[in-house]
Image (cartoon, coloured by chain):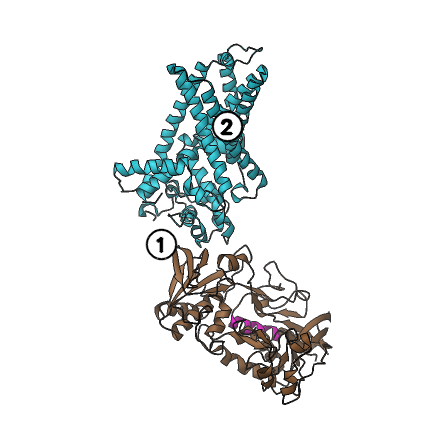
Chain colours: A cyan, B brown
Amino acid sequence: MLSPKYVVPKKPDLSNELIKLGGEGIKRCYQCGTCTAICPLSKTQTVAVRRMIKKLQLGLEEEVLGDPTPWLCYFCGDCNETCPKDATPGNIMDAVRKYQIINYSIGKFAKVFYDKVYALASLVVMTIIGLIGMYIFHGEMVTNVVDIDSFIPSEILHDAGLVLLAYVIIVMVAHIANMYRYTKRAIGYGKSAPLGKWVSEFFKILIKEALFQSRLLCEEGRSARYFAHIGVIWGFILLFAATGIHFISDSFGLGVPEIVPRVVGIIGGIGLLYGGIYYLIRRFEKKELYAKASDLHDWWLLLLALGSGISGFLVTVFMYANMAMATYIFYGIHLLFVFYLIVSAPFSKLVHMIYRPFALWFASVWEGEEI
Amino acid sequence: MKPVMVVGGGISGIQAALDLADQGIKVYLVEKTPSIGGRMAQLDKTFPTLDCASCILTPKMVEVARHENIEILAYSEVLEINGEAGNFKVKVRKKPRYVDVTKCTGCGVCMKYCPSKVPDEFNLGLSERKAIYIPFPQAIPLKATIDAEHCLWFQKNICRNCEKFCPAKAIDYEQKPEDIELNVAAIIFATGYELIADHSLLTDQYGYGRYANVYTNLEFERLVSATGPTGGEILRRSDRRHPKNIAFIQCVCSRDVRMNPNCSSICCMASVKEAILVREHHPDIEVTIFYMDMRAFGKGYQEFYDRAKEEFGIRFVRSKPATIVEDPETKNLIIYYEDTHTSTYKAEEFEMVVLAVGIKPVVPDSFVPVGEDMFAQVKDPYLDPVASPVPGIYVIGMLNSPKDIPDSVIQGSAAAMKASILACKSE
């Protein structure tokens, strides 16, 4: 329910802002509730799709920013298909996600990644920084054999990785703090929950939802999309694990054979490529409803993830083919793609891997939603 | 002074024909089906006064039949229109009834002996009629018609029972279509409406046609009518017993951009009326109406809606249900919806569901220009609301735009006045 203190519209222009972010049907909605009732998630939990659109129409900015509903949505498109006003509730949910990403971000910096010009400029800046970094820190380029380690020494790479990791963690803590603040005011006002509940719900969501996406699997006839998404998630997890194993082994002198992180990385890479290519095809086909209108925010994540996956794969291929120069070039490209991905992570669509579990967590603790 | 032609024998066309004829102008009333009366003849009661529809309509029908200036061309269709305002040449085809109307007395003996059973259009398929039939007891003209598509003689060259038993010797299997040409000063089209019953919203989401106990509002009108197939008993299609509760769903295939963005304008009050009739017939049946906006705009409509809530205890839920699922054992229907006043998702079981299905006009498309909204275009929506852009042609009733009975009657009179001007000027 809307809390009484926010009944006064805060931002009359809110719906126009969301329309610019892709929720073009907001003003067409006549509040029939078909979207809420057709939503496959409604059977087990509160998915207040119509109520969210009402909040947008009324300009209740704080209510919108504190509503975890859009993070429950998988954009299956059933609501778009059955909406009698063609208000495209699925697209509106997507637009609210973008709106929340922007408003949770420090200084609303995420706006940069939703504007073609700024996004391109950010790519240029990141490329320059990356290239300068590689130029300064690169070692000897041995051309008779492939020797990545002397091209860019792994200690330097590990240090850079740690710096980036620290950056992501610090920024994400600030973003999640914003999300918590808004969500607490909107749905958790005056509510408290025992620590035990916070902990138990956290693990439930981490395992069932974040790692295995159980709810996406529950949707009939969408198993192809489920496996593609699982491929991407586990692709990222395994690639991160591969880097981690390498790093830990190196720093503590454990002497884990080189082949272990490599195999883990290759499996992860296959998963990432499989899912990435699946989504790429869907987004070009424009048949599935979620893939009908892809904007910068969708392409950004997809192309960067695919770019890092493909370049990483090529590095492996060239390395085994003993083609030194090609390996170094693609290694450089690969590092650049990973650099883009990580730097933009707290602001791009990739951040949904953090926001979604947190939104589910807050909803389950404060609203008692069954996960 | 030339005659005027009225096409369509529903309440709007009847009013136009009577008003013209009373001024001394000759009228040809062309009707596609075997009898005049139109949709209103199928209705049980009228809103907001709950008057019996037939009791208002049939005296008018009789007046038409007995009027010296009106010639009814029932079971006929307009084929061709030539000429201009004041001087139209209209070719009309009189379809063969295979019954000599000068001899037929409408006694109905033939219907008793005819062996071929056909879904009854008048009762929207809720009952059966014979291949030789009179659509309803108050039909005008009260003459039998053979439906050649289902007649054993025409299909298989057997039977001829009606000929054997007809006391008036009126059966004539040799009749052929007859084309006549009429010279008229003006033409009034009042071709009425039909339901939009073929969209996936109806068939997939709401299961109409798949689930026995899902009805359209017109079907329900026949079901609740004293002259209907059950004599006014509300019995479920699946097991012929009274339902414990009934749900009405508004705005089905109307106000929906996927097939029909228009508001049909009659369903709010029609459903409120049908709900009240349910409570009057069986006070123990609980009635729920799922609506989005209750459009009670006419004289006495708001009061009617208030009575439904306060006097008859009808429950109104602001929601458009998403899906209906049938319980295969009980044939009850589970409606999935969000109550938008409380923002709660619900699955509720009902024993019968009535869909307020949207309407589309029956358009004589080669003769009148049609607008983007599917309805006939008018010359000027404010100052000439019944005139088609084609001079001398008038469009009234549901063909013109969605409207209720009082508005259809008003347009009938308005078009009669306009047409009479042309008729008086003609030689």
Q: Which residue is more in the foreground, A252 or A359?
A: A252
Q: Is residue A309 visible?
A: yes
In the rendered view, tell whether residue A367 sits above or below residue B1: above
What is the span of residues highlighted in magenta in the rendered image?
B404-416
Looking at the rendered image, the quarter that the C terminus of chain A falls into is top left
Q: Position of residue B94 (x, y in %)?
A: 69, 77
Q: Position of residue B149 (x, y in %)?
A: 65, 73
Residue at image point 60% right, 63% down = B375
Using the image, tell me which numbered label, if any, was put on residue A80.
none
Which of the chains bears the disc numbered 2? Answer: A
Badge 2 density bin: few <14, some 14–19, many ≥20, Cα 10 Å = many
Looking at the rendered structure, the kind of residue marked 2 is Gly
Q: Quadrant of residue B301?
A: bottom left
- How far apart marks 1 and 2 lie (CA) works out to 48 Å
Q: Which residue is more in the foreground, A25 or A170?
A: A170
Residue that numbered label 2 is attached to: A269
- Label 2's element? helix
Is residue B406 part of the magenta span, yes or no?
A: yes
Is residue A38 part of the magenta span, yes or no?
A: no
Residue at image point 69% right, 72% down = B78
Residue at image point 51% right, 40% down = A224
- Label 1's element? loop
Q: Which residue is more in the foreground, A343 or B206?
A: B206
Residue that numbered label 1 is attached to: B342
